[in-house]
Amino acid sequence: MTMNANKSRPLARPTIVLGGLVAGTMLMLSAPGAGIAQAHEGNPTDSGQAVGRDGFDNPAPGVRLTQAFGDNLFNERTPFNKALNESPMGQSYHRLYGTPNYEDHIHGSNGTRVGLLNSPGFRELYDGLQDSGWRLPGEADLPGTAVRRVSGVKPGTGSGHGHGHGEEDDADDHGVHALADEDTSMSASGECAGDSLQKAALSADSGCDPNGH
């Protein structure tokens, strides 16, 4: 009995070690701090700009889509959005997924969730495969079209729907300019009409043709 028990111990140790490694990996991935941002500051990507944030090194489409959707909920645009933004849910969202900066995306925060391929361990593995010649894209290599459709941020403008810098503001600006142009045009027309009437009156008094004939 003692010999059998002693023989079984070496078989149990690798199982325990392997189980510990698996459990540790799962805890690391599920922990809120698992995604400490690995993006270099000043790393512009189309997907990052689509949500008002600095770019990641490696793709994180799930994170970007979550940010695009969440930013349209957790903001200060309406009383309802503001209430959500200041709620525990909103605070948790910003901690995990950051806060956008549409004027200067470099200063927008990504939060602690940066995606699997930017997390410790997996990031090094992905980067190593790229260095080995595998043609794997970085986030900068991918378009942010799908993310922009959700966020509403126009390419190259740094503005988005519902964040105080969107199409509504642009429409207001265009409306102001249109009204100003219309007033100018009406004033000019009024002046021209006044000149014509004055010439007609002078011509009538003098008995001359207003066209000078």
Image (spheres, grey):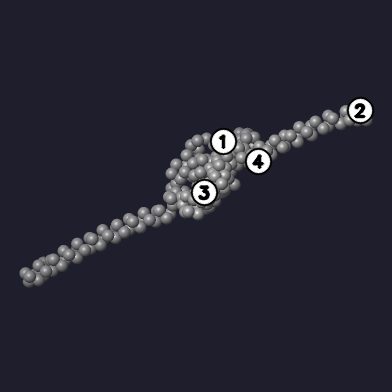
Badge 3 or badge 2: first in the primary sequence: 2
Residue bearing the label numbered 4 = 30
Q: Is residue 154 left or right of residue 8?
A: left
Estimate the x, y position of residue 3 in percent, counting from the top left: 91, 28
> Which amino acid type is shown beneath numbered disc 2?
Met
Q: Are marks 3 and 4 in contact (CB under 8 Å)?
A: no
> Marks 4/2: CA distance?
42 Å
Tally the marks. Answer: 4
Q: Quadrant of the C terminus?
A: bottom left
> Marks 3/2: CA distance?
65 Å
Check disc 4 and report its element: helix, strand or loop. Answer: helix
Badge 3 or badge 1: first in the primary sequence: 1
Check disc 1 and report its element: helix, strand or loop. Answer: loop
Q: Residues within 10 Å of mark 4 (few under 14, many from 20)?
A: few
Estimate the x, y position of residue 32 in percent, counting from the top left: 61, 40
**Mark in front: 3 vs 2:** 3
Check disc 3 and report its element: helix, strand or loop. Answer: helix
Residue bearing the label numbered 3 = 85
Check disc 2 and report its element: helix, strand or loop. Answer: helix
Q: Is residue 50 left or right of residue 4?
A: left
Image height of 120 relative to 158, above or below: above
Residue bearing the label numbered 2 = 3
Q: Is residue 12 left or right of residue 35?
A: right
Q: Are marks 3 and 2 in contact (CB under 8 Å)?
A: no
Estimate the x, y position of residue 87 in percent, counting from the top left: 54, 48
Q: Residue sitting at 51 percent across and 51 percent down? A: 83
Q: Quadrant of the N terminus?
A: top right
> Which amino acid type is shown beneath numbered disc 3?
Asn
Any mark on residue 64, and which? none
